Amino acid sequence: MAAPGGTAPGHAPAGQERFFSLLSSVQGARMEEQRCSLGGAAGGGSPPPPPELASLLERLARSQGRRMDEQRVAAPRPGGGGGKD
């Protein structure tokens, strides 16, 4: 039995195949363009940030670390401890 487009079920028309092949290659190229390297052994590395930026990033990391510490809660004791005996 033929599918609505006049082709056998499970088979896409040649034009549709070409379209999806083109779409796949364009999207793949676009993904490669947006990819970044993380430095380290595989990458060429990047120059260190300017001192002002490095200082700002350090302060930001410390501030965020303090905020995370302030939001921590103590885990409940096993058996529901802390209640009256």
Image (cartoon, rainbow, N blue to C red):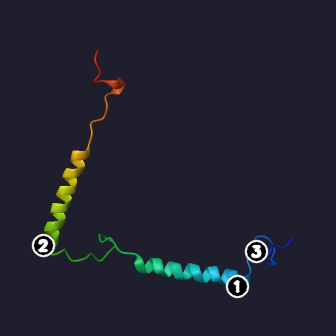
Mark 1 crowdedness (10 Å alpha carbons): few <14, some 14-19, many ≥20: few
Of 41 and 32, which appears nearest the observer?
Answer: 32
Label 1 amino acid? Gly
Sequence order check, earlier mark of 1 and 2: 1
Marks 1 and 2 sit apart, C-alpha to C-alpha, by 56 Å
Screen quadrant of the N terminus: bottom right
Of 28 and 56, which appears nearest the observer?
Answer: 56
Of 36 and 59, which appears nearest the observer?
Answer: 59
Marks 3 and 2 sit apart, C-alpha to C-alpha, by 60 Å
User: Which secondary structure, mark 3?
Assistant: loop
User: Which secondary structure, mark 2?
Assistant: helix
Residue extending furthest toward the top: 85
- Percent from the top left, x then y, of residue 4? 80, 74
User: Which secondary structure, mark 1?
Assistant: helix
Q: Which mark is residue 51?
A: 2
Q: Is residue 39 above or below residue 17?
A: above
Residue at the (19%, 51%) spot, across then down: 66
Residue at the (80%, 77%) spot, across then down: 7
Report which quarter residue 3 is drawn in.
bottom right
Label 2 amino acid? Pro
Residue at the (18%, 56%) spot, across then down: 63
Is residue 55 toward the left or the right of residue 85 in the image? left
Q: Which residue is mark 3?
A: 11
- Percent from the top left, x then y, of residue 18? 66, 84
Q: Which residue is mark 1?
A: 15
